[in-house]
Image (spheres, rainbow, N blue to C red):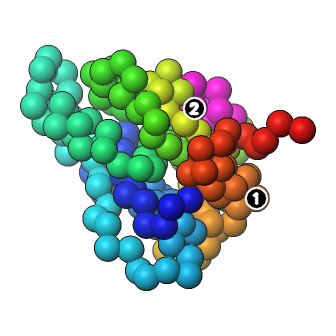
């Protein structure tokens, strides 16, 4: 992938400064480190939208806060979209924000879905629910979504970033990022 892509984070947790935000920021840092290996430290500012901070505006049609947040996120190269798992899927708050996105909002943008849950029984929710939502908005998804068990969030931030970097590599997401940057399919070249 091109070095130093701009990275954004959208977190759909209704609690401010949540563990989901912590996980999403750690995943964004793992992506940043992996895509800037061997180059200078990234100077690109991380764009963060914590849905809890704009929650009061979400249900006001035409809210400038939501519209501005979506417009800002639409400009990044890589977008981490994170949510805690509620009732086996992403939160209603995240859905309410994404419902306000225009058609094709993420066209030609790379998105990495992330779900956090208390039980591994919800591990498939990221693929079954969040990934299709992002694809519907036009996102290019370079590999399977990322699932984190809440128990992994107690680790020191550096340890969590290393764990997420390993997940990105093992799940083929880093290779998918490279393929997308080269204008190829994120799932590999035909045989």
Quarter of the C terminus within the rendering: top right
Question: Where are the magenta residues, as a range?
Answer: 123-132
The count of marks equals 2
Where does residue 169 sit, x and y in percent of width and height? 70, 61
Residue at numbered disc 1: 170
Quarter of the N terminus within the rendering: bottom right
Q: How far is mark 2 from mark 1, CA to CA?
A: 18 Å
Identify the mark nearer the N-term, 2 or 1.
Answer: 2
Q: What residue is at 35 percent from the left and 49 percent from the top?
A: 76
For mark 2, give the secondary structure.
Answer: helix
**Quadrant of res 45:** bottom left
Q: Is residue 134 above or below residue 6?
A: above
For mark 1, give the secondary structure.
Answer: helix
Residue at numbered disc 2: 131
User: For the residue carrying disc 1, how many other residues have a C-alpha within 10 Å: few (<14), some (14-19), or many (20+)?
Assistant: few
Residue 133 within the segment the image draws in magenta: no
Q: Is residue 78 above or below residue 99?
A: below
Where does residue 129 sit, x and y in percent of width and height? 58, 26
Please indicate whether residue 138 sits to the left or right of residue 180 in the image.
Answer: left
Query: Is residue 47 or residue 35 the one in the foreground?
Result: 35
Q: What residue is at 43 percent from the left and 31 percent from the top?
A: 107
Where does residue 130 sit, x and y in percent of width and height? 54, 31
User: For the residue carrying disc 2, how many other residues have a C-alpha within 10 Å: few (<14), some (14-19), or many (20+)?
Assistant: many
Please indicate whether residue 10 sits to the left or right of residue 112 in the image.
Answer: left
Whether the residues at callouts 2 and 1 have beta carbons within 8 Å, the answer is no
Where does residue 58 sit, x and y in percent of width and height? 20, 27
Q: What residue is at 46 percent from the left and 36 percent from the top?
A: 108
Residue 88 appears in the picture as rendered: no
Residue 127 within the segment the image draws in magenta: yes
What predominant SS class does the magenta segment belong to? helix
Residue 35 appears in the picture as rendered: yes
């Amino acid at each position: 992938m091109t070095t130093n892509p701009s990275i954004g984070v959208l977190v759909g947790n209704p609690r401010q400064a949540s563990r989901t935000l912590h996980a999403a920021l750690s995943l964004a840092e793992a992506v940043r480190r992996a895509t800037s290996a061997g180059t200078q430290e990234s100077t690109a500012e991380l764009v963060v939208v914590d849905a809890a901070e704009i929650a009061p505006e979400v249900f006001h049609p035409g809210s400038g806060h939501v519209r501005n947040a979506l417009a800002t996120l639409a400009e990044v190269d890589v977008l981490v979209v994170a949510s805690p798992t509620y009732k086996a899927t992403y939160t209603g708050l995240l859905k309410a924000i994404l419902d306000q996105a225009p058609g094709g909002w993420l066209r030609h943008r790379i998105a990495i879905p992330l779900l956090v849950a208390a039980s591994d029984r919800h591990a498939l929710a990221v693929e079954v629910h969040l990934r299709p939502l992002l694809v519907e908005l036009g996102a290019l998804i370079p590999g399977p979504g990322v699932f984190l068990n809440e128990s992994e969030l107690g680790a020191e931030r550096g340890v969590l970033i290393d764990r997420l970097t390993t997940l990105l590599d093992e799940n083929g997401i880093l290779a998918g990022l490279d393929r997308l940057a080269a204008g190829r399919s994120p799932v590999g070249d035909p045989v």
